[in-house]
Amino acid sequence: MAKEMKVTPWEVSGHIDYEKLVKSFGTQHVTPQLLRRIEKAAGELHFMLRRKIFFSHRDMDWILDKAEKGEKFVLYTGRGPSGDTHIGHIMPWIFCKWLQDKFDTELYFQLTDDEKFLHSDLSLEETNRLAYENALDVIALGFDPEKTFLFVDTDYGKTMYKIAVQVAKHVTFSTAKAVFGFENSTNIGMAFYPAMQAATAFLPSVLKGKKIPVLIPAAIDQDPYWRVTRDVAEKLGYYKPAAIHNTFLPGLQGPDSKMSASKPDSAIFTTDNPRDARKKIMKAFSGGAGTLAEHRKHGGNPDVDTSYQYLYNVFEEDDEKIKEIRNAYKSGAMSAGEIKEILAKKVERFLKEHQERRERAKHRIDRFMLKD
Ligand code: TRP
């Protein structure tokens, strides 16, 4: 039997049943009708929408209503700086970039050095340093400096704390325990932290002095925060934020394996030397049959193959090409080595270009950062 699924903001494990998550979290499916509406408004559909990588949402229809009436919405996403950035982290950021381009929207990006300090053995100095490292990866993706605002919680505390205390006053400890599973042994910083993550959904309204609709693209494990945020929003005079949720990218060790900064071989990090990344791909879990002869005869399984999954989720945007790869791999015409080679080439190229843009971001970071 597969290990029982667990999806919380701090732990994702077991085999993930996304259908079950939609039910238990009470979110909506991304339906064909919704996709048609997005396509009409944006002029095209991002491949992560076409492929249902963004599979679930809250109030996307309301965001589209606003957009159709010409009312601006803004984007909000973030990152808990507990280590280097890996490819799984940047999936929602890539999608945010597309939304920014298509809808001409601002993006607010929260880097939670406080959260990761409270939740790990890292020092605050270290999580703060990592926040600025991770910020370089965000900037390297090409966001518009006029419309993109990054901040690090402990360096934007004066503004954030004023919003967070308003939120905190309306969230009881019993709600926090029920939603986040806090226990008596949980430190009280953790019990307060959700107010900080909620506060960012109201930050644009505070900064602009009027109610601003907010859309949050993020992996589904962050949804518990949005439930609490949505509960308090109207009491505080703000709109409930909308959300759109993506699935998780598997680790390099196979379908239900996890990516972790403490296990270098579990993930491809944006700071990996492209040659090392290639080696990781060559060692990664494969859905190919045991020997080449068997593979030619029976074919491989793309649904568990790491290289196929990385191509499908991130590196091959072209639907025709991904279909060809899928069919060739399944039939055995394409070998496990060949599919790895396709991914390795794309990843090497991405890393080389990303790392150049990341270097340049070091000189541009001040243009993006909000500070008190
Ligand atoms: N809690 C998130 C993490 O651990 C960081 C975060 C803060 C975030 N605000 C967010 C993530 C908004 C997505 C969207 O990574």
Image (cartoon, grey):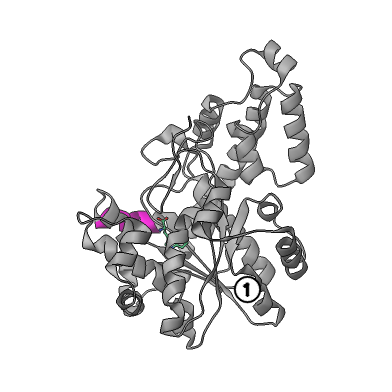
Image quarter of the C terminus: bottom left
Q: Is residue 147 above or below residue 71?
A: above
The residue positioned 41% from the left and 68% from the top of the image is: 228
Q: Is residue 67 above or below residue 281?
A: below
- 58 with respect to 175 (left or right): right
Residue 207 image offset from top left, x and y in percent = 45, 83
Residue 140 image offset from top left, x and y in percent = 54, 56
- 4 with respect to 307 (left or right): left
Dominant secondary structure of the magenta stretch?
Answer: helix
Residue 159 image offset from top left, x and y in percent = 35, 78
Q: Is residue 260 magenta?
A: no
> Where, by quadrant of the figure, is residue 99 drawn?
bottom right
> Where, by quadrant of the figure, is residue 287 drawn?
top right
The residue wearing badge 1 is: 63
What is the magenta range? 124-131
Q: Is residue 171 above or below residue 96?
A: below
Say which element carries label 1.
Answer: helix
The residue positioned 73% from the left and 24% from the top of the image is: 334
Residue 243 image offset from top left, x and y in percent = 55, 65
Q: Between residue 40 and residue 354, name the one nearer to us.
A: 40
